[in-house]
Image: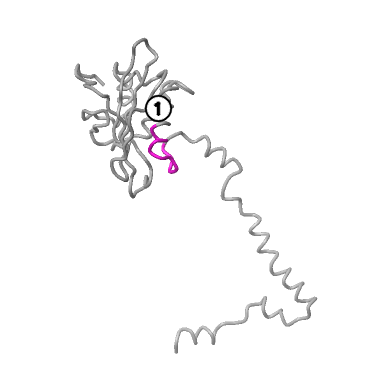
Amino acid sequence: MSFCSSLSSSARPFPLFSKLKQSDGDHRHAATVSASPRFKASADVPDFLSADWLESRKKRPFGPRLNFSAEEAVQHQLDALKYNDQPRPDYGIEVMYRFAGFDPFERSPYFGPFFDLGQFGRFRRIFHHSTYRVLLGHKDRKILSSLLVKENRFKQRVWIQGSRPEEEETFEFTLVQRVGGSWDGYWLTESLLHDGDAFSGGLAY
């Protein structure tokens, strides 16, 4: 005997349909009685999203967004560094760390030389180095050039005027758009290089 035929021979009428043969008045009553427990049960289930879900999303730590273009990703990072200590000290550097596309378990050429940047403290100290500190609270900036090297690779050179007298430097951002994985489609910073020999005198980080 086939599976389908065994089902058809053993199946019994569903109680709701068996009551459809009653009069219109009885049918309406039967439908109301059988459906009301379902509605009551569903009313007891809480909403999947809390009432303050949208506000909590707005308050999430600022970092890469899927809808950011490469140019916007650079702009947001520079804005964060310009207002580095708002809303708390070195918040701008925290934003830079979220945009950083290196593996925290491997030495990275993010700043040029291969540094161990897995700990945020080390990453932060380099920004307070005499060369990179010009970015913190800078007064002005100017985009010198932008180039889409490949479909998923972008470079931009930026001139920075610092907050101290006669303080100016040029930096080059390299961003890569990830393909696959949890960061698929996001533009992350592969490197932020000083346009010169930033660490010629060495660096204790």
Residue that lies at the very extreme toward the right in this rendered image: 25
Number of numbered tags placed on the structure image: 1
Res 29 quadrant in image:
bottom right
Res 143 quadrant in image:
top left
Name above or below for residue 48 compared with residue 108: below
Q: Name the foreground residue: 114 vs 2.
A: 114
Residue 76 appears left or right of 25: left
Q: Which residues are magenta?
A: 64-74
Please provide percent x and percent y for residue 146. 33, 34
- Residue 65 lies in the magenta-colored region: yes
Residue 21 appears left or right of 188: right
Please provide percent x and percent y for residue 28. 76, 73
Q: Which residue is mark 1?
A: 78
Please provide percent x and percent y for residue 126. 30, 22
Identify the residue shown where x is 38% and y is 43%.
Answer: 186
Residue 173 appears left or right of 57: left
